Image: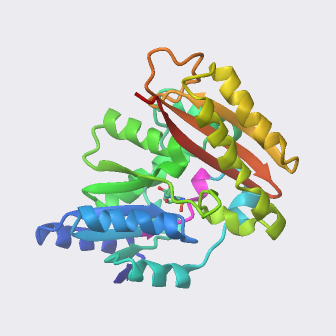
Amino acid sequence: MQVVRVPQEAAAWGAKARWQGLTIGFVPTMGALHEGHLSLVEEARRNCSAVVASIFVNPLQFTDPADLRNYPRQEGRDLTLLEGAGCDMVFLPTETGIYADHTRRTYDLGGLDQRLEGISRPGHFQGVVNVVERLFHFVRPDQVFFGEKDRQQLTVIQHIAKQLHWPEHIVPVPTVRAADGLALSSRNQRLNLEERAIAPVLYRALERVREAAFTMPVAEALEAGRAELAKAPAVRLDHLEIVDAELLLPLANWNGHDRAVALVAAWLGPVRLIDNITLHRSA
Ligand code: AMP
């Protein structure tokens, strides 16, 4: 596995791979890798003949300086995991390298960045799209793998890729969970033992919503989820919403929808956790 820090060298690696007729699968990450990230690498392996991952903690997408400062960093361990997962090249840019000669852009995200996560983290999705554009510029992948864990991020990227006719094919990958249902996340490392034991309540709340979905009114399905969360007073709810799967706009009722998404964001101790599930109308 090749480790590349200079963007121009990453671009040259990609150009050579394409010249050799390889298709490049790309997995952008912020490191502190876990099984969720590795499932993206595995999916890239299945779909493409060369796999590139990147590790870059992107300052532009952090709205809270403490979150950026405390974000876990473990490069040596990450490289071992990526090598084991069959990654061919890891791109580890520096901030000055990736943003050299770059003018920060404000993208038209059709309002997608103004709701849900966008309310608590203004500017976050603009920061995500800026870095993704930079990473794509250098790596020039054929397919890019994003986790459904960050549903709004996935939707934002799908939206902008379509709007700007980006040639990269965006591939969603299902959320990997711990045995108790907690969605794997780098931020879980910052939970203490007590908080870690409480954290699966987010997923249980989503399951309560799923049980009520399409049979009970939307408001009652949300109430069932909130009641589950209320059992854990340490959890400070940010939002629990049921939205349509395309624009992520809140649903007033189930009419005309066979699919919807339930999303939750909540604070537990020093950590803000997010999760979501897709709701399907059963036939
Ligand atoms: P991050 O390092 O948090 O920026 O995540 C990098 C990529 O991994 C994003 O596309 C995430 O959605 C994805 N990801 C993070 N956690 C999971 C998970 N538990 N299951 C699947 N994908 C995940």
Identity of the residue drawn at 27% across and 65% down:
46
Identity of the residue drawn at 34% across and 83% down:
1
Q: Quadrant of the C terminus?
A: top left
Instruction: Give the residues in magenta.
Output: 54-61
Percent x, y for residue 182? 64, 57
Residue 163 position by quadrant: top left
Q: Answer above or below: position of 176 versus 85.
A: above
Q: Answer above or below: position of 275 versus 218.
A: below
Residue 40 position by quadrant: bottom left
Looking at this view, name the residue that lies furthest to the right: 233
Identity of the residue drawn at 59% across and 23% down:
250
Query: In this image, 233 relative to 280: left or right?
Result: right
Percent x, y for residue 203? 65, 48
Does 214 lie within the magenta span? no
Identity of the residue drawn at 51% across and 78% down:
78
Percent x, y for residue 251? 57, 21
Residue closer to the observer: 235 or 16: 235
* Residue 53 visible (yes or no): yes
Query: In this image, 11 relative to 54: left or right?
Result: left
* Residue 115 visible (yes or no): no
Q: Answer above or below: position of 39 versus 217.
A: below
Does 58 lie within the magenta span? yes
Residue closer to the observer: 67 or 96: 67
Query: In this image, 237 relative to 63: left or right?
Result: right
Q: Answer above or below: position of 86 versus 59.
A: below
